[in-house]
């Protein structure tokens, strides 16, 4: 007799019940919706958003189901996709790029499933439509800026010690020139005392007559770059969250790149405008009139280029220290901007301001621009450069810390503009777009339909074939195949993995592998039967003899899938995810689920004549 | 039990493979691969029109853009158009430029997909893909040496090279676009071909280890192949059923992917029968190799 023990049966079927439960949310229909992310909208400010939106839509006779207001976004739910798509066009026209609109879907997962953590599968951009960006951090420029600022603070420290010096710097070294030999050794002492970080020395000191060259170690340089990329990641995440789009992805890729994915968003220009602001901020004290030109820079004001001011070369804090900035109104109803800094920023700010009350503190916006010109051969030359301009130059009223405000602004428009610049300017290092992809909503839907349909057709053909070729055994294998599909869906939904088009293909491949496992088993059973072994024993031998082959074949394929996941990006990763999950579940279903069914069919009786 | 004289006619398969490999290699060397945007960088734009798209109109519209070396073709259906082009390093001319131009000339449909990739990213992906395949092969070789015997490892790797080269060659000969999804397919083929090689190797090892089975290496190999032949055909057939469904109904996005996989499944099954066995014969696999299966892996490790 061939029987599983009770606990084995319970175990197998509880796994299946678990699978069905967590795959279930995918079968409740979703309703098409449009998400409106307020971000820093001026248009919807001080209006009743619900009334305004419903008026805009009703004016164009677009039927919608309801409008829900969420924390910093609104969601309009429609009954069908046609209304959703025309609604998007109407709202986009109305928005004029002032707020971000994302196509979305509202799941109708019942309460009890939500409560046990059930949710539908995340769809990748190729299936849901949306925008994909890849940004690259300009690490060399960042190190150049860092070293330039560091050089300036060395010169400052020297001056406090009555040492006269001057410096030049690039991305990996600072050259300091001294006026007399005596100063050099004093400066050298100071530099040697300040040449430490957590991971060893910062630079090698090379002395040459009255020059000192600081050659920064690769270790330290990669440390600061790493920090900058992490900071940028945080800043980008904040900006993307500010967009209010649901399920966005902001991830580091490799050493200096960041992936941003915005499902449902179609308007690449507006999205780019917000996440791609290649801007940074520098807080610098206004220079004293007596300061030499070596210690100060001249900047124009962003809003009135005819005005200008001199600021010190030393940067007190930069945009990456700003954690938040909000526009609001003071006690007298005048506009102001509230600024929050991180702890390091607060400390630096305290040090810089405590002895400088009454002086001004300028905020410089650093923007990356491109200029075009022609060389002698009339070739078009394009060059990126940094444009620095003052966005605020306010008087310090008290020693500032991690939280302070800027007042004296003309109007609330200026306040919200400044707040946005302060917030969005919180990038540690400049970045540029290196990849951009927009997938329209219809293409996504088409991809889903085609992918799902073809998989269905493929499955049906396989089912038919297995049933005809192996009859009852084939039926067991088919049930196992369906269980496999259910389990893959359940696991993907539960762990929040993203299903992409190559992912669907990965599932198809695991179907092939699952069928293979069953064919191997059945072929073995039939061989055993041919050598006149008792049918029950033949079934036992068939399963056990095929086992090691199945395991070997699946482990090697799993290894390939894991390698793909580790080195691949984008579509390759999507494929690797479903393939890995599918291989594991297919071994379980093809061996154990099939076996339990075969046991159920044949295991409890005497079989005289068994054919496979 | 079937009794097909596989070993006797092994040379037929080898000659066929040799010819195929020669043709594909020549094409790969002389013509190369038609690399997709993922690997070259550049811009691609897919536009859908309500009616049959007028390619001439589109071409004349965007030819007004300076520096243009656009490729304009139908994609999937008569209504869909694919515009592809390379651009300068900084991509001053990009998808938006084309959309604006078409809008100016009043002939813009619905932009269903737009893609902009900087050349340098493409280059990196190319390297990454190659490394992925090589690492995959290496890991597999180590696993097989560990589980089986180094001669089986040679067999499996030879089969992998054979399969991957033929797929690459077919993409080269028919000028099909080789993009990231095809690379994924190629890696899946690595997995699939391996699956086949392992099933065959497993059977050969079992028969060689069986004390009761007597006969020359050729006889044992032939018997093993016959034993797994039915399984190989059935599995390939069922996998092909799904893949062909994907190829026919999966749409443009999955076409080359499923094509690469289909070809891979066919040559993968074939190579497990002909190439693996050829290598085992060439390396003089004998019962003796199986006697100390546990010592063999250590011997091979000492090579490093």
Image (cartoon, rainbow, N blue to C red):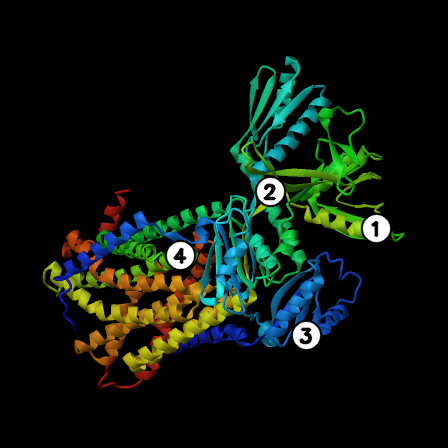
- Can you identify the residue that label 4 sits on? B177
The residue labelled by disc 3 is A62
Q: Does A592 sit above or below residue A265?
A: below
Q: Nearer the viewer, mark 4 or mark 2?
A: 4
**Frontmost residue, B89 versus A480:** B89
Give the alpha-carbon distance from disc 3 to disc 1, as whole Å: 37 Å
Q: Is residue B291 left or right of residue B199?
A: left
User: On the picture, is A331 further left or further right than A58?
Assistant: right
Residues marked 1 and 4, same chain:
no
Q: Closer to the N terminus: mark 2 or mark 3?
A: 3
Q: Which residue is mark 2?
A: A228
Same-chain check, marks 4 and 2: no
Between B83 and A383, the residue placed more toward the observer is B83
The residue under the point 33% across, 58% down is B174
Label 4 lies in what chain? B
Q: Residue at x 70, y 38 (%)?
A: A388
Image depth: mark 2 or mark 3 in front: 3
- In-front residue for pair A33/A538: A33
The image position of residue A469, as x and y in percent, is 28, 79
The reply to whether discs 2 and 3 touch (Cβ–Cβ < 8 Å) is no
Residue A298 visible in this rendered orientation of the protein:
yes
Q: Secondary structure at mark 3?
A: loop
Which mark, residue A411? 1
Q: Are labels 2 and 3 on one chain?
A: yes
Which element is circle 4 on? strand
Q: Quadrant of residue A49?
A: bottom right
Residues at marks 4 and 2, CA–CA distance in whole angstroms: 38 Å
**Picture coordinates of residue A184, whole percent (x, y):** 63, 17
């Amino acid at each position: 007799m061939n029987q599983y023990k009770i606990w084995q049966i319970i175990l197998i079927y509880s796994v299946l019940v678990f699978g069905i439960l967590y795959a279930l949310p995918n079968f409740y229909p979703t309703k098409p919706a449009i998400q409106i992310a307020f971000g820093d909208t001026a248009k919807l400010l001080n209006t009743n958003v619900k009334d305004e939106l419903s008026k805009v839509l009703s004016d164009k006779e677009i039927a919608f189901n309801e409008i829900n207001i969420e924390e910093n976004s609104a969601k309009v739910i429609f009954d069908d996709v046609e209304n959703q798509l025309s609604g998007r066009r109407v709202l986009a026209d109305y928005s004029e790029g002032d707020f971000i609109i994302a196509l979305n879907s509202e799941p109708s997962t019942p309460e009890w499933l939500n409560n046990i953590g059930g949710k539908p599968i995340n769809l990748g951009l190729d299936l849901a439509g949306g925008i994909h960006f890849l940004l690259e951090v300009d690490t060399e420029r960042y190190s150049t800026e860092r070293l330039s600022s560091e050089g300036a603070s060395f010169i400052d420290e020297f001056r406090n010690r009555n040492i006269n010096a001057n410096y030049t710097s690039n991305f990996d070294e600072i050259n300091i020139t001294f006026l007399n030999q005596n100063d050099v050794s004093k400066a050298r002492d100071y530099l040697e005392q300040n040449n430490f970080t957590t991971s060893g020395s910062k630079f090698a000191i090379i002395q040459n007559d009255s020059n000192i060259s600081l050659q920064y170690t690769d270790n330290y340089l990669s440390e600061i770059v790493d920090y900058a990329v992490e900071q940028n990641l945080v800043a980008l995440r904040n900006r993307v969250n500010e967009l209010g789009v649901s399920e966005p992805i902001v991830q580091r890729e490799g050493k200096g790149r960041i992936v941003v994915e915005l499902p449902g968003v179609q308007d690449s220009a507006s999205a780019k405008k917000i996440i791609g602001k290649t801007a940074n901020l520098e807080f610098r004290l206004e220079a004293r009139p007596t300061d030499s030109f070596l210690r100060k820079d001249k900047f124009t004001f962003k809003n009135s280029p005819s005005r200008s001011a001199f600021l010190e070369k030393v940067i007190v804090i930069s945009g990456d220290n700003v954690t938040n900035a909000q526009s609001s109104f003071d006690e007298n109803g005048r506009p102001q901007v509230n600024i929050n800094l991180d702890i390091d920023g607060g400390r630096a700010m305290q040090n810089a301001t405590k002895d400088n009350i009454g002086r001004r503190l300028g905020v410089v916006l650093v923007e990356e621009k491109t200029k075009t010109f022609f060389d002698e051969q009339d070739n078009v030359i394009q060059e990126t450069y940094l444009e620095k301009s003052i966005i605020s130059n306010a008087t310090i009223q008290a020693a500032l810390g991690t939280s302070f405000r800027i007042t004296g602004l003309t109007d609330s428009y200026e306040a919200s503009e400044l707040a946005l610049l302060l917030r969005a300017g919180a990038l540690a290092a400049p970045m540029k777009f290196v990849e951009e992809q927009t997938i329209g909503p219809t293409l996504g839907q088409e991809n889903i339909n085609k992918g799902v349909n073809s998989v269905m057709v493929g499955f049906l053909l396989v089912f038919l074939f297995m049933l005809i070729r192996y009859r009852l055994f084939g039926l067991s294998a088919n049930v196992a195949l369906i269980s496999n599909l259910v389990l893959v869906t359940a696991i993907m939904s539960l762990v929040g993995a993203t299903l992409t088009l190559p992912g669907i293909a990965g599932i198809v491949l695991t179907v092939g592998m699952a069928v293979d496992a069953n064919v191997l088993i059945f072929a073995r059973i039939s061989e055993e039967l041919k050598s006149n072994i008792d049918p029950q024993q033949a079934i036992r031998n068939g399963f056990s003899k095929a086992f090691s082959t199945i395991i070997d074949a699946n482990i090697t394929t799993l290894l390939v899938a894991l390698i793909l996941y580790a080195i691949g990006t984008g579509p390759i990763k999507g494929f690797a995810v479903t393939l890995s999950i599918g291989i594991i579940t297919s071994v379980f279903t093809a061996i154990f689920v099939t076996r339990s069914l075969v046991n159920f069919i044949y295991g409890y009786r005497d079989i005289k004549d068994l054919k496979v | 039990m079937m009794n097909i004289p596989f070993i006797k006619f092994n040379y037929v398969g080898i000659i066929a493979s040799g010819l195929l490999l020669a043709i594909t290699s020549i094409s790969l060397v002389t013509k190369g691969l038609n690399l997709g945007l993922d690997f070259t960088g550049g811009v691609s734009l897919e536009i859908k029109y309500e009616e049959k798209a007028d390619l001439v109109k589109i071409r004349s519209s965007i030819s007004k853009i300076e520096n243009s070396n656009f490729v304009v073709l139908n994609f999937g259906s008569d209504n869909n158009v694919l515009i592809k082009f390379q651009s300068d390093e900084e991509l001053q001319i990009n998808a938006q430029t084309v959309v604006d131009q078409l809008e100016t000339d009043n002939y813009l449909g619905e932009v269903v997909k737009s893609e902009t990739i900087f050349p340098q990213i493409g280059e990196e992906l190319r390297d990454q893909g190659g490394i992925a395949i090589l690492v995959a092969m290496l890991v597999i070789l180590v696993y097989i040496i560990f589980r089986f015997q180094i001669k089986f490892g040679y067999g499996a790797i030879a089969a992998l090279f054979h399969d991957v080269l033929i797929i690459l060659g077919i993409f080269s000969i028919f000028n099909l676009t080789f993009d990231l999804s095809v690379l994924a397919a190629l890696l899946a083929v690595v997995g699939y071909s391996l699956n086949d090689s392992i099933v065959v190797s497993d059977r050969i090892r079992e028969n060689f280890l069986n004390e009761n089975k007597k006969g020359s290496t050729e006889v044992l190999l032939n018997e093993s192949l016959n034993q797994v032949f039915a399984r190989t055909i059935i599995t390939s057939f069922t996998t092909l059923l799904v893949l062909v469904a994907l190829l026919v109904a999966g749409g443009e996005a999955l076409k080359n992917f499923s094509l690469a996989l289909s070809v891979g499944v066919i040559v993968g099954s074939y190579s497990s029968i002909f190439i693996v066995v050829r290598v085992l014969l060439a390396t003089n696999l004998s019962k003796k190799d199986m006697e100390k299966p546990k010592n063999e892996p250590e011997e091979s490790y000492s090579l490093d």
